[in-house]
Amino acid sequence: MTVPSAAPWTLLEHAPLQSLNTFHVQATARWLLHIADPQALPQALALPAIADQPLLVLGSGSNVLLASDPPGCVLCFGNRDIAIVAHHADHAILRAGAGASWHALVMWSLQQGLSGLENLALIPGTVGAAPIQNIGAYGVQVGEFVQAVEVYDRDLGQFLRLDREVCGFGYRDSRFKREPDRYLIVAVELRLPLLHELRLDYAGIRDELAAMGADMPGAPDVAQAVINLRRRKLPDPDVLGNAGSFFKNPVLPQEQIGVLCHQFPDMPVFPGEHEGQGKLSAAWLIEQCGWKGLREGDAGISADHALVLVNHGHASGAELLALARRIADTVRERFAVIIEPEPRVIGAHW
């Protein structure tokens, strides 16, 4: 291990990654670079051992599938600072370091009397990973509340502050996802309201609030309802390896959806982000193909949620990927619909 005197970074050779991905698959990094101070990035990335190597950023590894050992260097951020940097009459600006826990940030913001992120409670991962995937749940996407993303631009060799408008947020998508080798997210700024209209009309939130006895719910109540729902629906990655929802809900033209609904009248359909589009439930498609709860060796699909690919113990990343491909193939064969993974597949092509 190489450690500079001020220790803004550490570099470890042949580092195991099983504890750094929520599938808990075994993989090894040729080099593992831990950055405590993002300002040390230019110096650390210039180290001869890693200067010309491919670079993979890992937060908690909750949105990746390591199909094989990643090439080059794996980078982890250790800056976990969270602070309110500006107060306004109806909102505040919150800044969080890339290494901070996303769920911890959500709960901290609620404790400060801020709202907006309550529907995104209990999503695993780090703050730095959130904009890449434009994480979303229960009718909310993080991109709605991003004011700016602070990055190190590897192409320019500069630190930049990118306003929300240039981040290119879409459904489970962003500029950072489309250019994964260029931008290293070091911090995120969020514009959070003091009060806003709660979003309760999605996937059982109102029923859960009623069961909780929350007749006049606030944002903390919604967060608790979401936590309860997620804990019932999704397996705990610490107990059963998984990366949450593995497949994105397919977005299709309304004409194609109309044909499918004629063939399959029970098919659930949700509004798309753009006019003339609709969104299908990937979970429904997968369940109709008979995959829910099935297991091949230690690779399987959760018995509680058909979107969740799980590692029952010793499945390799390659075995999980092979199962995911077979699931997608059966959906395409039955429905003529293509489903794609949410997590980034490392070491193989989808």
Image (cartoon, rainbow, N blue to C red):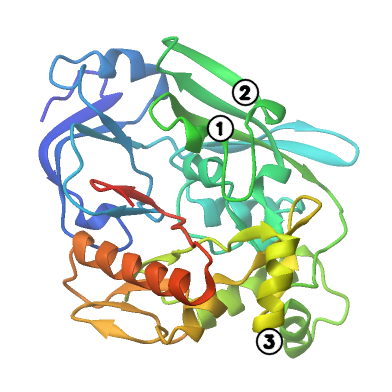
Number of numbered discs visible in the structure rendering: 3
The residue sitting at 62% across, 54% down in the picture is 106
Residue 26 picture location, percent across and down:
16, 58
Name the amino acid, label 3.
Asp
Answer few, some or many: residues within 10 Å of disc 1's Cα (few below 14, many 20 plus, some between 14 and 19): some
- Residue tagged 3: 266
Residue 204 vertical placement versus 54 (above, below): below
Which of marks 3 and 2 precedes in the sequence? 2
The residue sitting at 16% across, 52% down in the picture is 27
Discs 2/3, front:
3
SS for dot 3: loop
Residue 346 vertical placement versus 302 (above, below): above
Taking 210 as reference, is 129 left or right? left
Residue 203 visible, this angle: no
Say whether marks 1 and 2 touch (CB < 8 Å): yes
Name the amino acid, label 2.
Leu
- Residue tagged 2: 162
Residue at the extreme right: 89
Residue 17 vertical placement versus 282 (above, below): above
**Between marks 3 and 1, how big is the CA–CA gap?**
36 Å
Residue 55 picture location, percent across and down:
28, 30
Residue 219 picture location, percent across and down:
77, 63
SS for dot 1: helix
Residue 85 vertical placement versus 293 (above, below): above
Label drawn at residue 175? 1
